[in-house]
């Protein structure tokens, strides 16, 4: 008997010729929980994956990314971000259980979705947003690294991070105006390389842009990112 990783309800296995012949990956969450994951779809910002509407766009970009790209300090550092789901209340609760309460197994539910979207990215190296030493000790694991481990992706530690107050406690303005907290390492390995950064949530884009900028200034080529939520 299998139980849904999210709600713990019993899941019934439905055998089909397709599942038998193609060895389809068994789902680890029930249909009800999967339906509560709001997939980002339709026309999206060419940089950050935000769903576009007529009031919040200029061409194929959202107004946030237009502002980022007009700023000479940030222009061109992050080429593209792919986010899978809207950060609704359901996903917010799931990520909190995973990220802050250490329910590591929940990450398995996102593997098929991430694996499919990784096909849309071209890269030489995969890395993750690092935690500071203090934060890693507090949580016991890096939530982004756990995702790549489950995907069997080979990663390189390309960044170190200074310890700061939790991002979740900061306002949008505070996040955007943060001083640089990342430093690039493995400088020889990243020269002119295309890099994908993995993280859990894209909020204002500040964290990913700070990381991308550190890599870019150290000699990297195109920097893209992929996150669970936006």
Image (cartoon, grey):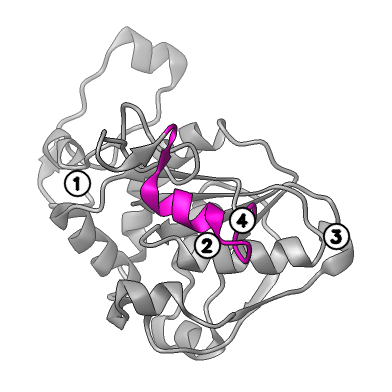
Per the image, the residue denoted by label 1 is 4
Tag 1–tag 4 contact (CB < 8 Å): no
Number of numbered discs: 4
**Eyeballing the image, is 148 above or below 169?**
above
Per the image, the residue denoted by label 3 is 189
Mark 4 surroundings within 10 Å by alpha-carbon count, few (fewer than 14), some (14 through 19), many (20 or more): some
Per the image, the residue denoted by label 2 is 208
Say whether residue 139 is visible. yes
Whole-angstrom CA distance, mark 2 to mark 4, is: 13 Å
Tag 1–tag 3 contact (CB < 8 Å): no
Q: Earlier in the sequence, mark 1 or mark 3?
A: 1
Residue 88 percent location from the top left of the image: 18, 52
Q: Earlier in the sequence, mark 2 or mark 4?
A: 4
Q: Earlier in the sequence, mark 1 or mark 2?
A: 1
Q: Earlier in the sequence, mark 3 or mark 2?
A: 3
Q: Which residues are magenta?
A: 59-76
Whole-angstrom CA distance, mark 1 to mark 3, is: 41 Å
Tag 2–tag 4 contact (CB < 8 Å): no
For marks 1 and 3, give the one nearer the viewer: 3
């Amino acid at each position: 008997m299998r139980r849904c990783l999210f709600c713990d309800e019993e899941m019934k296995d439905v055998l089909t010729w397709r599942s038998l012949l193609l060895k389809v990956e068994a789902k680890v969450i029930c249909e009800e929980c999967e339906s509560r994951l709001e997939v980002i779809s339709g026309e999206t910002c060419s940089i950050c994956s935000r769903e576009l509407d007529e009031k919040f766009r200029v061409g194929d970009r959202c107004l946030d990314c237009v502002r980022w790209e007009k700023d000479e300090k940030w222009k061109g550092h992050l080429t593209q971000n792919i986010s899978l789901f809207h950060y609704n209340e359901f996903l917010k609760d799931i990520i909190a259980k995973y990220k802050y309460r250490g329910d590591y197994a929940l990450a398995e539910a996102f593997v098929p979705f991430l694996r499919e979207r990784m096909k849309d990215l071209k890269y030489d190296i995969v890395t993750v947003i690092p935690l500071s030493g203090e934060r890693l000790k507090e949580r016991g694991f890096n939530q982004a690294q756990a995702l790549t481990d489950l995907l069997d992706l080979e990663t390189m530690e390309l960044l170190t991070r200074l310890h700061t107050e939790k991002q979740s406690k900061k306002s949008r303005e505070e996040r955007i105006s943060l001083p640089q907290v990342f430093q690039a390492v493995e400088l020889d390995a990243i020269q002119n390389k295309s890099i994908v950064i993995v993280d859990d949530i894209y909020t204002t884009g500040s964290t990913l842009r700070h990381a991308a900028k550190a890599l870019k200034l150290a000699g990297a080529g195109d920097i893209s990112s992929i996150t669970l939520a936006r």
